[in-house]
Amino acid sequence: MSRRGRSGPVISLFAFQDIITSVTAIVIVVTLFLALDLVQRKQGQASESPTVLAEELVARITALEGELAKLHKELDRSDDLVQQVASTSPAELRAEIIQRELAVEDLRQQLQRQQDREKRLQSQEKAVAAEQFDLNPLRQRLDQTIRETRELQGQIDQAKQENRLLFTLPSGTYKEGWIAVVDSGRITVAPLGRAARPQAFVSTGTFLKKSAAEAMVEWIDRERLRSAYFLVLIRPSGPRTFDALEELLQSKSMSFGFDLIDAERAVLHPERGAAP
């Protein structure tokens, strides 16, 4: 009988054998690495010093002994408390519990009162701060008034020391007031009610002679002071000068009055004039 010839593709197992061989090699390499790691760990553990291990064990034992001592103390306290409770009657325990509850309630009330007091103090502090803020302008004005009062008092004291005559216009007078001190050939004027340096008018001896009274009246016209009131103080040497001034003031229909003063009587301050 004749043999039939093979037909179809030929199957090769060479690739599958390669895969099996590769996987086997990988497993062997991984196994070798794991064995090497185990050997290194064993060597590291074997290289640790017994002295270090002993010190760690002693430290752990010491800590455990300390904790054990604490537990013994707490146990002794518990025993004492148990003995105290066992030796106390239920009625005494109830009374003590009630007393403790009352003490706790008293402490709570004290705490509440303290908190209420703190709230009141805080509200009072806020109110005081608000009042101080509102009073700041008043305080500033008061300080300014005090300074001005002190300055005036100082001026009054200085005027007393200077022994000067002080003049003021009568209350209800709306005119501007001036003082004129008349000497021989000289008139010195200063305003009433305000500090100002006095102004002096003297007779000139030039070709065109001008008396002190004429110089003063010209100044009045320049300053537009015809509606002002002039208080004329006449020294013993100034009657003639006053006569000329009186005639000129009357011709201008101006308001004025006059009085006599001593020759040495101080009236005008060289800087403040007729002011204190």
Image (spheres, rainbow, N blue to C red):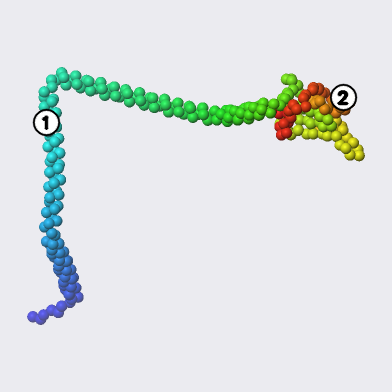
Residue 85 showing in the rendered view = yes
Disc marking residue 250: 2
Residue under the image location 69 percent in, 28 percent down: 162
Residue extending farthest to the right is 207
Quadrant location of the N terminus in the rendered image? bottom left
> Is residue 269 shown left or right of residue 251?
left
Q: Mark 2 near mark 1, Cβ–Cβ under 8 Å?
A: no
**In the rendered image, the vertical position of residue 14 relative to residue 273, given as above or below:** below
Bin the neighbour count of mark 1 within 10 Å (Cα to Cα): few under 14, some 14-19, many 20 and up. Answer: few
- Specify the label residue 109 is tagged with: none
Identify the residue at horizontal 12%, vertical 29% (top origin): 80
Instruction: Give the percent coordinates (x, y) of residue 249.
Output: 86, 26
Give the residue type at disc 1.
Asp
Residue 245 relative to residue 20: left or right: right
- The mark nearer the N terminus, 2 or 1, is 1
Q: Label 1: which residue?
A: 79
Which quadrant of the structure image shows residue 256? top right
